Amino acid sequence: MDFSKHGFTVDLLSSFVLVVRNFFLLTFFPYKAMRKIAEGKDYWQIGIIFSLVFIYFKFAYFLRDKPYPATFIFFVFLLHFFLSVFFFYFLSSIAKKNLKISSFIFTFSYALLPTLIWFSTTSVLFIVLPPPRTFSLTGGAFTIFFTAYSLSLLAWKVILVYLAIRFSTKLNFYRVVYLMILYFAWFIPYSVLLYYNRIFRIPFI
Amino acid sequence: MKTFQYKLQRKLDEVYSVESNDLGVDLLTFIYKKSTSYLKSLPFVIIIPLSLFVAVLVYLLIGRIAIKVTSLLQYGF
């Protein structure tokens, strides 16, 4: 079979398979998976993840009340994604030389997966079980389920973000935690700004 | 043999791409390595039961507030 004629399609399909494979590896073996992802070179995978994010924003546009256009929200997301990447890259370059920015882009892109899953499922639940929840048995049961689900994804997110910073910056535990504290020092006010401008209620990062 | 050696070298480069964490105090390093060993592989085996336990505890302690927060979070997307 001659695949050279269908190079673009073959590349895209194989990258999609790799994204799915990495998703399962990050679920079951996050440490080894993130270590491998940090050496990634296939930018189609980043394109696929960003496409999934864009599809989500298009979907959420129809559920929100008087929203901004999905394309605008997507560009705001790209802005704070690359701000985050460059923040960690430049600060960690002070301590370590010869860091590759591609490691940051790959690891931080894959660390978006828990965020994407939480936002997508919350959007679907908004249609299937619209709020508000009542003070009944079913309301309480859903509260327990949703809280447990959100906490699980949050824990997974924290693990992936820690691993993303660790494998891209190659810094030790204390310096990674220090970088995260510095990051939140500007990211929290920035998130409040996004909230007051009705762009993101919860920051998509 | 050369292929095996090449693959082994690549694997070793990958495994040793970061230095092992040392928290400065032996006890802290031990606690860190012990706790993270459960999170490196199959973390959801720990995370899901723990999250469920915390969710039930939160509901039992501050049930009405938890329900209101859940309603708020559902608008969070």
Image (cartoon, coloured by chain):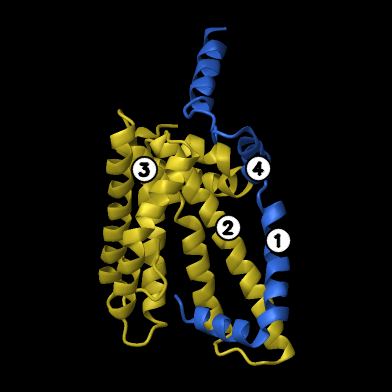
Q: In the rendered image, what is the letter of the chain coloured blue?
A: B
Quadrant of the drawing holding the N terminus of chain A? top left
Quadrant of the rendered structure where residue B40 is?
top right
Q: Which residue is mark 4?
A: B41
Q: Earlier in the sequence, mark 1 or mark 4?
A: 4
Q: Earlier in the sequence, mark 2 or mark 3?
A: 3
Which amino acid, mark 1? Leu
**Image mark for residue A104:** 3
The residue positioned 64% from the left and 37% from the top of the image is B33
The Cα–Cα distance between marks 1 and 2, rounded to whole angstroms, is 10 Å
Q: Secondary structure under badge 3?
A: helix
Which amino acid, mark 4? Ser
Q: Nearer the viewer, residue B28 or A182?
A: B28
The reply to whether discs 2 and 3 touch (Cβ–Cβ < 8 Å) is: no
**Quick one: which residue is furthest to the front in this view?**
B25
Q: Nearer the viewer, residue A177 or A199?
A: A177
The reply to whether discs 3 and 1 touch (Cβ–Cβ < 8 Å) is: no
Q: Which residue is mark 2?
A: A155
Circle nearer the viewer, 4 or 2 = 2
Q: Secondary structure under badge 1?
A: helix
**Image mark for residue B50:** 1
Circle nearer the viewer, 2 or 3 = 2
Horizontally, is B30 left or right of A123 in the view?
Answer: right
- Give me the chain letter of mark 3: A
